[in-house]
Image: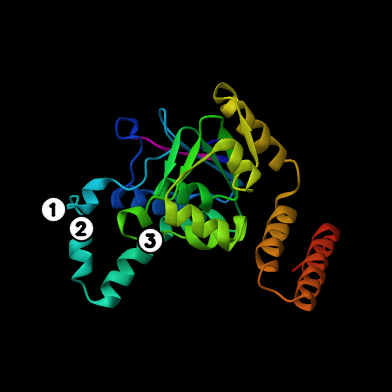
Amino acid sequence: MSGAVATVTLDRPQRRNAQHPAMWAALCDIGRSLGGQVRVVVVQGAGAAFSAGLDLAMFTPAGLPGAPSFREMASMADADADAVIAGYQAAFSWLSRPDLVSVAAVQGHAVGAGFQLALACDLRVLADDAQFTMAETSRGIVPDLGGSGILVDLVGYPRALEICATGRRVGATEAVALRLAEAVVPGAELTAAVADLVAALLTAPRDAVVETKALLQAARTRTDVDRLRAERAAQLRRLRDLAGTGE
């Protein structure tokens, strides 16, 4: 962490940053522990891949130490299983908080949970070798880490269904064309491109960015009248703050 920027690195390069419940718990802890000075969060993966998705040991009867296997989850009461999955989702959902702007720096494969982690971020910058794959349906499960709704928002229902149901790979160029990412750059330039984006995101006053992000997030579900009302209220808060008369 450096001042206004926090960098989160998935660091299992020997397993292509495959994800598991302990990693999700660590992500939750990071979200809770961020200091108020942090404005931008960069999420990246060590090594050649962003994330290969779920650690496949979760599909085995034994599962992984310290976490229920999928078989054990299937035998739980509905409320208990729901609580487990909700805890996993929390590892991703904090990245959309209005007080932060999150950026995924994606190289190589982003599969399943890796794709959903990238989708959980506000913005995505891709290396030219990046590939998105929503592999859950092909494995008999569903995307349950927040990715289904975000994917529909970005690419529309028909394309989202096609991507999920076929489990095909979406390359970097197509991802940008589908609005799944903001930019694609040569792999050697990914770090610099993300740094340039972060610097640009930090130029505007923090409170104005926070208010604007909140407006944009809520605009998808508000009526035109409610959007205008929300804009008026937000603008008045900004004007009072700038004038030194805010509460």
> Would you say residue 57 sits in the magenta stretch?
no
Q: Position of residue 172 (x, y in %)?
A: 56, 37
Residue placed farthest to the top in the image? 188
Secondary structure under tag 3 reads loop
Disc 1 residue type? Answer: Ala
Residue beneath the point at 57% across and 51% down: 36
For marks 1 and 2 on the same chain, the one whose residue lies earlier in the sequence: 1
Disc 2 residue type? Answer: Ser
Q: Which residue is mark 3?
A: 142
Q: Which residue is mark 2?
A: 69
Disc 3 residue type? Answer: Val
Please tell me which residue lies in front, 166 or 122: 166
Q: Position of residue 6 (x, y in %)?
A: 53, 41
Q: Are marks 3 and 1 in contact (CB under 8 Å)?
A: no
Secondary structure under tag 1 reads loop
For marks 2 and 3 on the same chain, the one whose residue lies earlier in the sequence: 2
Q: Are marks 1 and 2 in contact (CB under 8 Å)?
A: yes
Residue beneath the point at 83% across and 57% down: 242
Local packing at callout 3 (Cα closer than 10 Å; few below 14, some 14-19, many 20+) is some
